[in-house]
Image (cartoon, rainbow, N blue to C red):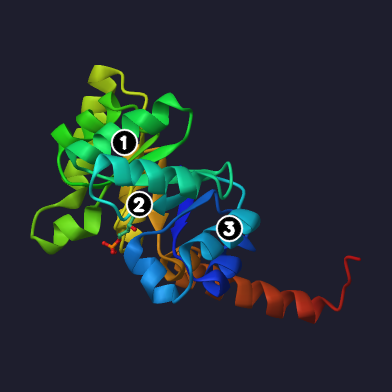
Amino acid sequence: MKFFIDTADMALLTKCADTGLVDGVTTNPTLIRQSGRNIHEVIGEICALVDGPISAEVAAMDFEGMKSEGLALSKIHPNVTVKLPMTWDGLKACRFFSDKGIKTNVTLCFSVNQAVLAAKAGATFVSPFIGRLDDQVSDGMDLIHDIVEAYVAIDAQTNILGASVRTPLHVKQCAMAGIQAITIPPALFLKLIEHPLTKAGLDTFAADWASTGQKIA
Ligand code: E4P
């Protein structure tokens, strides 16, 4: 499973990228607003830092607007993945960019039918939002399992990118569902390594080793 980081914060992204385990990045208009930066500038910096698909979202709601914004974003770097909304215009734009060989991510997916439409439009990624479904007292992971099943049944080529991932349990469940990728906030990514028994074990090993007085190198 590929790990994408959902952020436009360069300091936090750098911390995650330093692990060598980051496969891509996703952004959205909210994250760009939170960064307080210009979208072209920040997407350019992200592309220079992480070698993988970098999702940059269009703001236009109509096909022509999405086309010109997506083309402008894709000129920033070949790794830019044009992020498009789950609307008819968004799917039309998805087909346009897919036909041009430009990677796409259809976002705000909340149903199997929407995921099937994204696959038909040639999307590189579809982003089902797990946490936002949980917020509505509907199990977001059910949607992931259903899309996995549907995509196998129709032999879809689109990658499932689990989004709105909020907890370590979501990460485990996505891995067990066998989806291709997830996008997660930096703080959650950095937390995944933690386990109290790992820390306790390391403390014991460090103390025991120190008492041997040995040196390995
Ligand atoms: C993904 O592309 C979205 O930017 C993100 O996962 C949304 O997460 P949220 O529901 O926690 O805002």
Q: Position of residue 26 (x, y in %)?
A: 43, 55
Q: Position of residue 202 (x, y in %)?
A: 62, 72
Q: Secondary structure at mark 3?
A: helix
**Disc 3 versus disc 2: distance between alpha carbons?**
15 Å
Q: Earlier in the sequence, mark 1 or mark 3?
A: 3
Residue behind label 1 places its C-beta within 8 angstroms of ligand 1: no
Q: Residues within 10 Å of mark 1 (few under 14, many from 20)?
A: many
Residue corresponding to mark 2:
58
**Disc 2 versus disc 1: distance between alpha carbons?**
10 Å
Residue corresponding to mark 1:
93
**Disc 1 versus disc 3: distance between alpha carbons?**
22 Å
Give me the residue at 60% from left, 62% from top: 45
Residue corresponding to mark 3:
44
Q: Secondary structure at mark 2?
A: loop
Vertical side of 74 occupied by 208: above or below: below
Residue type indicated by callout 2 = Val
Question: Marks 3 and 1: in contact by CB < 8 Å?
Answer: no
Q: Earlier in the sequence, mark 3 or mark 2?
A: 3
Question: Marks 1 and 2: in contact by CB < 8 Å?
Answer: yes
Q: Position of residue 169 (x, y in %)?
A: 31, 58
